[in-house]
Image (spheres, rainbow, N blue to C red):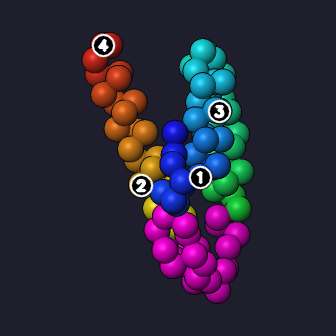
Amino acid sequence: MSGAGDGLGPRVETSLAVIARDHGLPADVLLDRLGREGAAVAARITQLTSDELARVGHHAAWGDMSVGAIVERTLVIHLESHVEQLRRLLGSSA
């Protein structure tokens, strides 16, 4: 769990709770959810204007960042790490 002052706080705890809750779900259910929710997120991101992507906010753990940088860091890089995890898992079970 995250500790006080680590900049992560309740969101990490919520994420861990979701992981624990969904851990036993069948892969097809999780993949269907990923497809639906991923499509909704992608659609919203493509609607962002240049001005919206350039807006700067303060992230508790990463400091000042533009919306575009947050999208890249939290989505692109994060999802790439999951793709790599899946490749390793599929490679080890094949």
The residue tagged with tag 1: helix, strand or loop? helix
Residue at image mark 2: 77
Q: Relative to 50, is 8 above or below?
A: above
Amino acid type assigned to the residue bearing label 4 in the image: Ala
| Span highlighted in magenta in the image | 45-69
Disc number lying in front (4 or 2): 2
The picture quadrant where one finds residue 90 is top left
Give me the residue at 30% from left, 28% from top: 88
> Badge 3: few (under 14), some or many (20 or more) residues near its Cα, within 10 Å?
few
Residue at image mark 4: 94
Amino acid type assigned to the residue bearing label 3 in the image: Val
Give me the residue at 58% from left, 21% from top: 23
Residue at image mark 3: 18
Residues 5 and 11: in front is: 5
50 falls in the magenta region: yes
Give me the residue at 41% from left, 39% from top: 83
Disc number lying in front (2 or 3): 3
Q: Earlier in the sequence, mark 1 or mark 4?
A: 1
Residue 3 in view here:
yes
Residues 26 and 36: in front is: 26
Q: How far apart are marks 2 and 3 (CA)?
A: 20 Å
11 falls in the magenta region: no
Please state the total of marks drawn on the protein image: 4
Q: Which of marks 4 and 2 is nearer the N terminus?
A: 2
Residues 85 and 49: in front is: 85
Disc number lying in front (1 or 4): 1
Disc sitting over residue 9 in the figure: 1
> Badge 2: few (under 14), some or many (20 or more) residues near its Cα, within 10 Å?
few
Q: Distance between the residues labelled 3 and 1?
A: 15 Å
